[in-house]
Amino acid sequence: MAATLDPDGETLIPELIAAAADKTHLSRQRGNPRGKAIELLGGYGAKADGAVPVLEAILESEADKSQHAAAQMALEAITAAP
């Protein structure tokens, strides 16, 4: 859906990376905004390659397993061969 609203990701990708890195006020919100940001980054595919370090850090962290799974899926989508 985010890719439909902002196909190039120029506006949303930096915001999604910040949310995935937990560097926003969104962590206090309900509904797992960090997990949703990770999922949306994967939807952008290779356009979101700037998120790779954040996603790798999530995989190495003690984040909950659902965030690990989302980060792994997003990494696969971002780094997949075209």
Image (tube, helix red, strand yellow):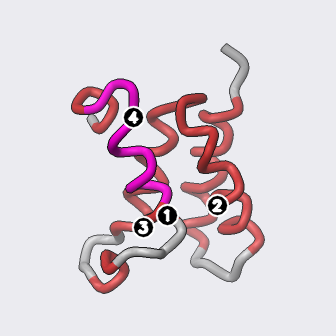
Q: CA distance from mark 2 to mark 3?
A: 12 Å
Tell whether position 28 is magenta: no
Side (left or right) of 62 relative to 36? right
- Kindly identify which residue carries mark 1: 20
| Magenta stretch in the rendered image | 6-17
Disc 1 to disc 3: CB gap under 8 Å: yes
> Could you tell me the amino acid type at mark 4?
Gly
| Helix, strand or loop at mark 1 | helix
Occupied quadrant, residue 73: top right
Check disc 2: other Cα within 10 Å, few if <14, some if 14-19, many if 20+: some
- Residue under the point 26% across and 27% down: 4
Q: Earlier in the sequence, mark 2 or mark 3?
A: 3
| Residue 25 vs residue 65, the one in the foreground | 25
Disc 2 to disc 4: CB gap under 8 Å: no
- Residue under the point 38% across and 75% down: 24
Check disc 3: other Cα within 10 Å, few if <14, some if 14-19, many if 20+: many
Disc 1 to disc 2: CB gap under 8 Å: yes
Q: Earlier in the sequence, mark 3 or mark 4?
A: 4
Task: Give the number of the mark in front: 2 or 3.
Answer: 2
- Kindly identify which residue carries mark 4: 9
In the rendered image, the vertical position of residue 7 relative to residue 69, given as above or below = above
Q: Earlier in the sequence, mark 2 or mark 4?
A: 4
Occupied quadrant, residue 62: bottom right
